Amino acid sequence: MDRHLRGFTGAGYDKGRPLLVQAAWFAVLNLVFVKWWFPTRWRPAVLRAFGARIGRRVLIRQRVRVHWPWRLDIGDDVWIGEGAWLLNLEQITIGSNVCVSQDALLCTGSHQRHSSTFEFDNGPIRLEPGSWVAARAVVLRGVTVGRSGVVGASAVAHHDVGPGAVVTTGAPA
C-alpha cells in the first residue's frame, strides 16, 4: 500500500487538555521533572498537579518521561526505573506493587497499517498488581499484563500477558 502521509488527520485523537496545559506540562517535564537533581519524592506530586492519580510510596527515578500525566493512574508501592517512557496517548493504569524497570517503554500509540494516511490506532495499557516490565522491555497499545505477569528484559508484549505468565525474547541462554 502506498502511504500518503500528507493526508494524515489524527481523527479521533483528543489530547485531553487545552494547549496551554500541554505546553506547561512539556516545560515542566523537560526543564525539571526528568533531571537528576530534581528530588525523587517530588515527582509524584508534580504528576498529581497535572492530573495523574498516584498512590502512596511511588518511586519515580530520573529521566522518566510521561507524555500526558492526566492519562496516568498508578497504585501504591510502584517503582518506575530510570529512563522509562510512558507514552500515554491513551490511559495507562499501573496497579500496586508493580515495577517498570530502566528504559522500559509503555506505548499506547500506534497507526492503522491499512490506512493510506496512517491514522491513529491507539489503545490503553494496564499493568495488573504485582507485574513487572523489565529493563528495556516494551508494552504496546491495548495490552494488559496480568497479575504477577512479567515482560522480560528487551521483550515486546504485543498481546495480553496472562496472570503469572512470562514473556521473553529468543531462546533460553
Image: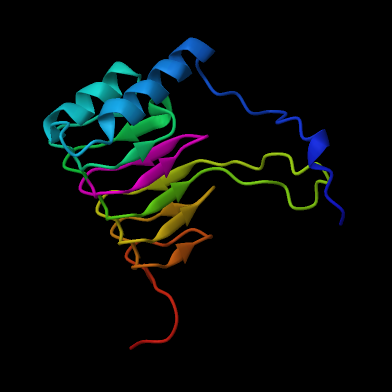
Image point (26%, 27%), residue name: 32
Q: Position of residue 166 (x, y in %)?
A: 36, 70
Vertical arrangement, residue 105 with respect to residue 164, above or below? above
Q: Quadrant of residue 67?
A: top left
Range of the magenta residues? 80-98
Quadrant containing the C terminus in the rendered view? bottom left
Query: Which residue is nearer to you in this view: 77 or 154?
Result: 154
Q: Is residue 83 magenta?
A: yes
Image point (19%, 38%), residue name: 76
Quadrant containing the N terminus in the rendered view? bottom right
Q: Is residue 158 left or right of residue 40?
A: right
Q: Position of residue 161 (x, y in %)?
A: 43, 61
Is residue 18 something one can see in this rendering?
A: no
Q: Position of residue 115 (x, y in %)?
A: 80, 46
Is residue 126 something one can see in this rendering?
A: yes
Q: Main secondary structure of the magenta part?
A: loop
Image point (40%, 42%), residue name: 86
Vertical arrangement, residue 141 with respect to residue 165, above or below? above
Q: Is residue 119 magenta?
A: no
Image point (42%, 86%), residue name: 171
Q: Position of residue 70 (x, y in %)?
A: 40, 24
Q: How many numbered circles does the render carry?
A: 0
Vertical arrangement, residue 135 with respect to residue 169, above or below? above
